[in-house]
Image (cartoon, rainbow, N blue to C red):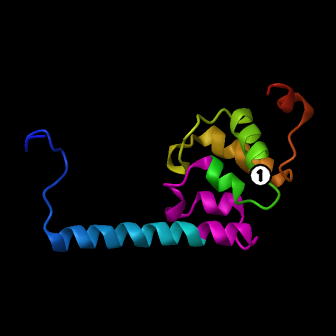
Amino acid sequence: MTEKENHLPNLSDKERAHALELAKNARKRRAVLKARMKSGELAFTDALNEEDAKRIEVVSLLKCVPGIGASKAEAIRRLVKIPLGRRVSGLGIRQREELTALEKNGWKMTAQKSKAL
């Protein structure tokens, strides 16, 4: 690959180390956020508004809610019509409202809505 084909920025060793440190810190903050959700300290709706949650996939964040596993998270994703791989920052207003309503309802999907699955 020639230098023109390489789209990566030319970073010095010091700049590269700094970028790696920033990335590591961001992963740690996201892990702490997920742990707070799993412990019940942080509600799903509150987590949606956290800065560190923006880069987390919605399904991954849903799985952090106590009582929601992979199957239920996938069912919620399809119910709210969230594309696979969508991150929290890419959620629309209506999707956020539906997720908030589901949380207020104890994550119980109504019979009508679950038939759509």
Q: Quadrant of residue 111?
A: top right
- Which quadrant of the figure has residue 65? bottom right
Q: Which percent across, then down, holds residue 79?
A: 74, 34
Please state which of residues 46 and 23 is positioned toward the viewer in this rendering.
23
Quadrant of the image for the N terminus?
A: top left
Q: Is residue 65 left or right of residue 27?
A: right
From the viewer's perspective, is 17 left or right of 6?
right
Q: Residue furthest left?
A: 3
Which residue is at a point 47% across and 66% down the rendered structure image? Answer: 27
Where is residue 38 drawn, in percent x and y?
72, 67
**Residue extent of the magenta highlight:** 33-58
| Vertical order, 52 against 71 (above or below) | below
Q: Residue at x 59, y 34 (%)?
A: 83
Res 75 → quadrant: top right
Q: Name the kind of residue labelled 1 in the image.
A: Gly
Q: Residue at x 72, y 74 (%)?
A: 41
